[in-house]
Image (cartoon, rainbow, N blue to C red):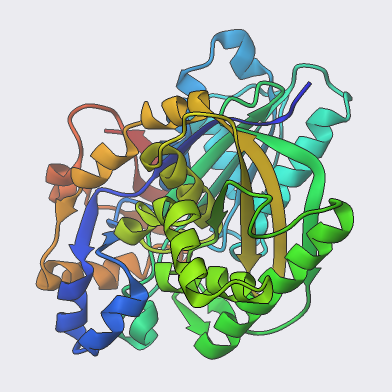
Amino acid sequence: MGYGIEALDVYTGLAQIPVPELFAGRGLEEERLANLAMTHRSIGLPFEDPVTNAVNAAKSLVDALDPAERDAIEVLVTSTESGLDLSKSVASYVHEYLGLSRTCRLFEAKQACYAATGALQLATGYLASGASPGAKALVVATDVALVDARAGYAEPATGHGAAAVLLSDRPTVLELDLGAFGLHSYETLDSARPTPEFDIADVDRSLFAYLDCLTHSFADYRTRVEGADFPTTFDRLAMHTPFSGLVRAAHRKLMREAGASARQAEEDFERRVAASLAYPAQVGNLCSGSLYLALASLLATDRIDSDLRIGLYSYGSGCSAEFFSGVAGPASADAVRAKDIGGRLARRRRLTFEEYAGLLPENLRTLVPVENRTVDTAAYEQYLPGDRPLLVHTRTKDYHRTYEWR
């Protein structure tokens, strides 16, 4: 019996700005666009927060289940850098608005952009243990962006949204190779969120840590999987994608370490990696949801006509990293394509730089705890899609957030 991802969906917001327009508005150097390798960036709206993003990502997965299957979800984990409270988890709200069973473990995980993978691995281990036959687990990676002009070149690379994975013994999307993983972690301050109003980042330290952890986590993978070889073991690759240019550099590094020439590395990148970057290039970094956006992109946009082994790399600042693998096939691609993620990306409302800049002051308040607040949702009704209900944040009363379906 296999275990892994039964269903996968992502929520990437309702608005976007073309990255060249953001570069121009900030006066950034245009020659650095090529390395960023992004076309658009998803933008949050004032009625969106980590709860709405999580629920809107996971709703399609839960709605597809019959009542007995829904009640089988007995583990719910939210992973986020965008917590709303120092005690209460985002998972508490997500559990409520998804209408999940009261007999459910729910909690929050935090380890920057790695946390969703840590939650996925621990939840899969629980399911595979047989402690609760037939159980399912739901892991939702959800964040909001706290960037403005202070972030420099990180501003156009930072995305908005959430990714949700439903785990079970029916791994339609990805059957995990149980026991096939490699780890590498240590303490470093390459990025942090010291207050609920802004991020800090040491860009160079973060890039080097990402690359260093890839080399060492794959080396650990090889100690656990006899004969594993980066160029030949995996038919496709999906990696945590802070921006597409970094993934290209990471792939080139491991190919070079395996003895490949520059030409061989470039050809291999186009064959095994490029499809995973189609969606991230239109969204930006989804933090711990980033890897699963890349996986969705790979399955939805590549040609998947047989079972393929996929190598996956997850990195989180601070830092913690894991290289692991699984198998996907034509049914996996069909399941992800049915979510119409590409169509939803195309339907986002395009913002001018002036509209984007006007949203920032309110968006930067998203995580700030306030006793009472009313969100002017009416001002943004035109952004809402007419084809499906979405959860929006409407008010806070006595520090308790409330939400409505619109």
| Image point (33%, 39%), residue name | 341
Residue 386 shows in the view = yes
The x, y position of residue 245, in whole percent, is: 42, 73
* Quadrant in which the N terminus appears: top right
Q: How many marks?
A: 0
In the rendered view, would you say 267 is above or below 246?
above
Quadrant housing the C terminus: top left
Front-lying residue, 281 or 159? 281
Query: On the picture, is 325 further left or further right than 132?
Result: left
Quadrant position of residue 319 = bottom right
The image quadrant that residue 147 belongs to is: bottom left
Vertical order, 383 against 199 (above or below)? above
In the displayed structure, 120 sits above or below 237; it is above
Q: Nearer the viewer, residue 272 or 132?
A: 272
Report the residue at 12% width, 44% height from top: 382
Locate residue 144 relative to residue 149 in the image: left or right.
right
Inspect this view and state whether residue 88 appears. Answer: no
> Which of the pair 328/11 is nearer the observer?
328
36 vs 276, left or right, is left
Horizontal and vertical percent for residue 78? Answer: 61, 47
Q: Residue at x 63, y 9 (%)?
A: 68
Q: Residue at x 68, y 70 (%)?
A: 258
Residue 50, horizontal then vertical, whole percent: 47, 52
Residue 130 lies, with reference to residue 299, above or below; the image says: above
Residue 360 horizontal/vertical position (percent): 26, 71
Give whichever of 342, 265 is nearer the camera: 265
